[in-house]
Image: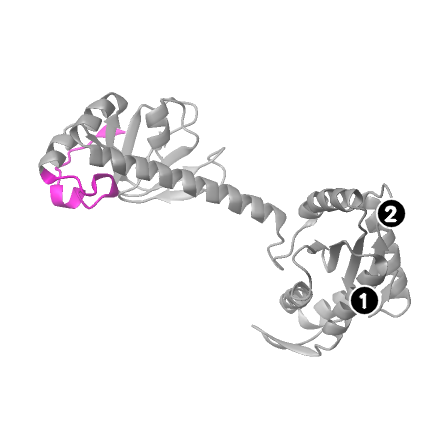
């Protein structure tokens, strides 16, 4: 990073969020506290290993933000007008992320020793800085939420995955046991799915799996959990339902797919699919593995009986 030859354009600078609504006569004085620096492409501006005492404002180019390691995918991009290092600038701690120049860039740098002086000169600028800080925290919370949701959801079908099944089973089995309520589990498999893929292709096969997920999901209660267990296998956790009620639901789901003889997809009209299902009701001290094993055995029986049926 090297000192840049930079001439401030007050009217242009005033458009940046950090200086929003700051009076022009104050702005010229405020900018004297900043220094401009040029960054080369791939130059590291901030690192978790180095304490940061500066606030950076991007005025040219683009920066990338990386969490954990520079080998990971960038989690966000900082464009002209965005700030970097505002959290560590305020608390004088190490940054929580790497910030790297994606291309040749220019930043305005402010040392934290100027913070109190800026409070005195421009309360509006400090208000803007606090708003930027709040925005950063909110974005971080959304990223945490998105990453947590992505970790629990199958990207193809938008169903929950095995990780979520383990979590929700622990919660629902405990709740149902305490309330002396039953809990049932359906395990289902798309019939002759390998032959479907061989005949129509893997992309149509993916659309068929999405059809199954969409059709089943629309008929379940909010408290039920539809999980893509793997490949063409799905699991449905049905809290507060005994085997008799779960069997009726399973039959309804089976018939709903049986009635879809063809469906429209981005690759044209495709034939529908049927499913086979196995049912198991939770017994005292049942583990998830034990419940799945009994449902899987019932599913195997359904396949032996010719498929497109429910056993258990």
Identify the residue shown where x is 73% and y is 77%.
Answer: 259
Q: Is residue 193 magenta?
A: no
Q: Is residue 183 left or right of residue 79?
A: right
- Residue 177, given in percent of the width and then of the height, sits at 80, 44
Identify the residue shown where x is 79% and y is 58%.
Answer: 186
User: Does any portion of residue 89 appear in the rendered image?
Assistant: yes
> What residue span does the magenta drawing correspond to?
1-24
The residue furthest left is 25
Residue underneath mark 1: 248
- Residue 247, given in percent of the width and then of the height, sits at 83, 63
Q: Earlier in the sequence, mark 1 or mark 2?
A: 1
Looking at the rendered image, the quarter that the C terminus falls into is bottom right
Q: Is residue 13 magenta?
A: yes
Question: For the residue labelled by badge 2, is the local secondary structure a helix, a strand or a loop?
Answer: loop
- Local packing at callout 2 (Cα closer than 10 Å; few below 14, some 14-19, many 20+) is few
Residue underneath mark 2: 283
- Residue 51, given in percent of the width and then of the height, sits at 38, 22
User: Does any portion of residue 57 appear in the rendered image?
Assistant: no
Question: For the residue labelled by badge 1, is the local secondary structure a helix, a strand or a loop?
Answer: helix
Q: Quadrant of residue 233?
A: bottom right
Q: Is residue 56 left or right of residue 77?
A: left
CB atoms of marks 1 and 2 within 8 Å: no
């Amino acid at each position: 990073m090297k000192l840049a030859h930079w001439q401030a354009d007050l009217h242009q600078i005033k458009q940046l969020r950090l200086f929003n609504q700051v009076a022009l006569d104050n702005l010229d004085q405020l900018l004297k506290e900043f220094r401009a620096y040029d960054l080369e492409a791939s130059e590291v501006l901030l690192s978790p290993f180095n304490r940061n005492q500066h606030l950076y404002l991007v005025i040219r180019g683009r920066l990338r933000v990386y969490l954990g390691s520079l080998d990971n995918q960038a989690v966000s991009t900082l464009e002209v007008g965005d700030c970097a290092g505002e959290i560590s600038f305020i608390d004088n701690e190490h940054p929580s992320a790497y910030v790297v120049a994606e291309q040749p860039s220019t930043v305005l740098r402010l040392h934290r020793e100027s913070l109190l002086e800026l409070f005195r000169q421009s309360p509006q600028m400090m208000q803007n800085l606090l708003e930027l800080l709040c925005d950063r925290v909110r974005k971080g919370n959304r990223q945490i939420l998105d990453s947590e949701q992505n970790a629990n959801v199958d990207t193809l079908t938008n169903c929950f995955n095995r990780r979520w099944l383990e979590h929700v089973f622990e919660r629902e089995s405990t709740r149902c046991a305490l309330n002396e309520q039953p809990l049932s589990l359906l395990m289902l498999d798309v019939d002759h799915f390998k032959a479907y893929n061989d005949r129509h292709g893997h992309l149509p096969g993916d659309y068929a799996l999405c059809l199954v997920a969409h059709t089943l999901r629309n008929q379940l209660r909010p408290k039920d959990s539809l999980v893509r267990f793997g490949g063409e296998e799905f699991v449905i956790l049905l809290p507060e339902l005994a085997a008799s009620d779960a069997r009726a639901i399973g039959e309804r789901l089976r018939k709903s797919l049986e009635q879809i003889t063809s469906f429209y997809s981005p690759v044209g009209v495709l034939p529908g699919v049927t499913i086979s299902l196995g049912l198991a009701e939770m017994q005292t001290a049942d583990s998830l593995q034990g419940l799945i094993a009994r449902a899987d055995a019932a599913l195997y029986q359904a396949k032996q009986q010719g498929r497109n049926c429910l056993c258990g």
